Amino acid sequence: MASINFNINGKDQSIDVDPQMPLLWAIRDVVGLKGTKYGCGVAQCGACTVHLNGEAVRSCVTRVGRANGQKIMTIEGLSENNNHPLQLAWQEIDVPQCGYCHSGQIMSAAVLLRENPNPTDQDIDNAMAGNICRCGTYLRIRKAIHLAAGGMQQKVGKNE
Amino acid sequence: MTVSRRNFLKVSGLTGAVLSLGFYSPTNAEEAEIIKAVEADSFGIEMNAWVHIDTSGKVTIFSHRAEMGQGVYQAIPQMVAEELEVNLDEVNIVFAKGDNKKYGNQITGGSSTVRGSYKNLLNLGATARTMLIQAAANKWSVAPTECYAQGGHVYHRPSGKQFHYGELVIDASKLETPKNVVLKKRSDYKLIGKPLPRQDTKLKTNGTATFGLDKEIPGMLYAMVVRNPRLRGKVKSFDDTAARKIPGVKHVVKTRMGVFSTYREGVAVVADSIWTAMQAKKVLKVEWDDSGFEHLSTADIYKRQAEALQTQEGLPFKQQGDASAIIAQASKKIDVVYETPYQYHSCMEPLNCVAHYQDGKLEIWGPIQAPEWVQDYISKEMNIPRDKVIVNMTFLGGGFGRKAFMDYPHEASVISKEIGAPVQVVWTREDDATQGPYRPGISYRCEGVVVNGEISAFKVKLAGQNNSHWRGGGKDKPNGSASEGFLKPYFDSIKNLSIQDVPFETPIPTMWWRSVYASTNGFAYESFLDELAIEAGKDPLAFRKDYLKEERLHQLIDKMEEVSGWKSRKKNEGYGTAITECFGSTVGQVVKVSRNTEGKLKIDHVWAVMDCGWYVNPDTIKAQVEGCIVMGLGAATMHQVTFQDGIPVDKNFYSYQLPRITDIPPIDIHIMENDADAGGVGEPGLPAFAPALTNAIFDLTGKRIRKLPFSLASV
């Protein structure tokens, strides 16, 4: 066991854990933020994606020890009122079905948009290929990212 | 479950002063009677409340169905709010607990939520509205015909006077429940038929939706189970010395769970956290007894299925005319075998369940599609009275049929009872992928004769594990779903037709997987039809139209032709089509393929036309069909469950590859407009995709694909 200190969603926190523990379980079961999901445990599905110092990481294979002294952001910290442009776009387009993977999808997309404010379809595909959605909402994910980027020239709607 | 109405209201955060109506239809939803909750109490009927309106005007609906992504969370309020004349944002939805005495069939499966209960839901809303209007009319001493309801108010048309629903609920609750209330006309709908936003989306964009794995109750421990990777192996012995030395490990117990009539054994490590349990699992030593299953291989199963199809006639499912004799005498015939793989549901949320056994009572929380099956099964298995087994549904991170099974809640319950504490059992992805039950892999022998451009004989034999045998179904009967997916009007137009089921058993437990047998049958039947059309020298879509003598299907085909540009396509340009039926809805798909500049095959476009009759929300339907096509793409071209030496080969997503955003072609979906009975929405979009794709590949390349999955890169 070791004392690990980090800043999570803007708050400093100290936890006493095995530094080998994956960040995923530290976030979910020690800090108590359940929005970050377990999907595969081997960095294949992206459901556990969080930001570590602004970079998207798969928290299921990131040891919590690595986060010592660092900044973590989870889906709960992405915006104050569920109003990050991506969250609003997700709501506008009704992207989720079961919803389980979308914390990870949105966290991956947030890094993409910060790095590339007006991505092409190809840019989106490249950035989002690590996130599986078993319900198959991919076309809507792509559309929502464009909407959030403000890059779509025509109105994006559910009726077309 | 004997939760009193008072308790039920308390649990759901409702006040007592409400208009509370439900319908009671334990066996036949068509004949449901709308009753007041207070009457249900006094008649001793278990309360069946579906909609409550309290004195503030707040409307709460109890959903007896699970939300696993298919939009129940939105469709049920949309239907009730329409007839009740309230705004959707004034409606809350609460998931009811599992209890089939109260709700009748609560299984979320068979795409049945809307199609099974929509008339009752509309009636429920209309009955409440009629009572509120009557209550207002009484207060004003006017005729109810002078009043109307809108936006949660009743208005008196001549005077413009109004009451909020909340002001009327006490009076309304004292009225007789009216019979034969008038439903709104489709043309007057404000909510139904509109692409309204789902009510659960916000919860699913900020991490606040509570899935099974997110459920916590006070004092809860975490269990992970060391499972035999080999199918159905028993625990011979285990050594937990090292596991017990890990701080935080509380118990190590042998456990078991029911899988149909068999039991699967494992050793559960119970700890203060999931991570601790995972560590203890690594050092737990288990010796297994694998006898009987150590040689099981799917390669062998397919070999035996193929042999059975060549050497045996099957149990007749449908026989008309004399297909076998015509085939035997034909100088030229088609005689081909189609193969479909075993499939794993691969829900994004691995299986998990919380159980708390205490003083002879059991309460369960989890991602559960079939709460009352869980209640029934566990009550019998663990000898606990039904009313002492309470099943709570959380959000489901995918279901696709897998979460309509009792094994994981049973396992959690057994462990909780054994250790005397509340526990959450958490399956790893590897557990989830390797334990089944799976969709059965079925082989089909298709024989046909074409004479003068017409089908002279049509024969399909299938061999594969019948799901119903696992549930105790008779083995002397053919698979009752031997033609599921295939359009029934073909039976009227193909005179010499034989469909047979060659009995075949494997030790691999099987169950439904999204769209069930239509997902495998659809590929065989619709590919075979394509072969017959080519043999007849006919356009594949026009050929189908000739045999489908129903106006509704002709309209569907016309729409398919229109949206896909079918008639203006050029010869062998890479277009394929398929039409399948599933749970009361028909879906036709057209797929266009081409080769890119490097000669690699690519899917250019998918067009799907859905005829699901009367429908609620077109956006939900489009989302479901999109999802079905993506799932169909994975099943056709990426993944399958195979066994070697009794062990599933693929254990996680690095080898069991699922479709990703980079794999998805453009998809256009069209919905037919008619007032026919509502069909299913969550599954019918899946079966037509694979055959439409492989038929398109044949059109482009002349290569007929008869075995799934296949790699697009290898074509």
Image (tube, coloured by chain):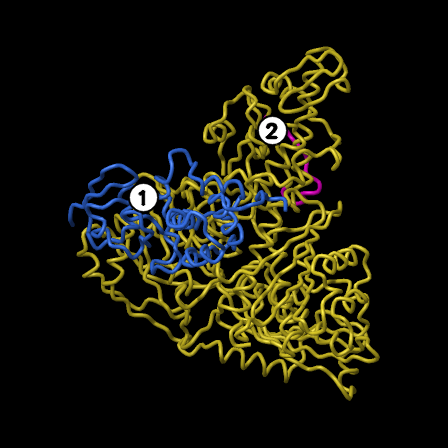
Which of the pair B71/B644 is nearer the observer?
B71
Q: Residues within 10 Å of mark 2 (few under 14, many from 20)?
A: some
The residue at 57%/41% (across/down) is: B101
Q: Can residue B28 be found in the magenta stretch?
A: yes
Residue with the most extreme left position: A2
Residue type at tag 2: Asn
Residue under label 2: B87
What is the number of the mark on residue A73? 1
Answer above or below: position of B506 versus A130: below
Where residue B147 appears, as percent x and y from the top left, is: 73, 19
Q: Which chain is blue?
A: A
Q: What SS does tag 2 mark? A: loop
Which stretch did the figure color magenta? B26-39
B550 to the left or right of B691: right
Q: Can residue B715 be found in the magenta stretch?
A: no
Where residue A83 appears, as percent x and y from the top left, is: 43, 36
In the picture, residue B408 is in which quadrant? bottom left
Colour of chain B in the image: yellow
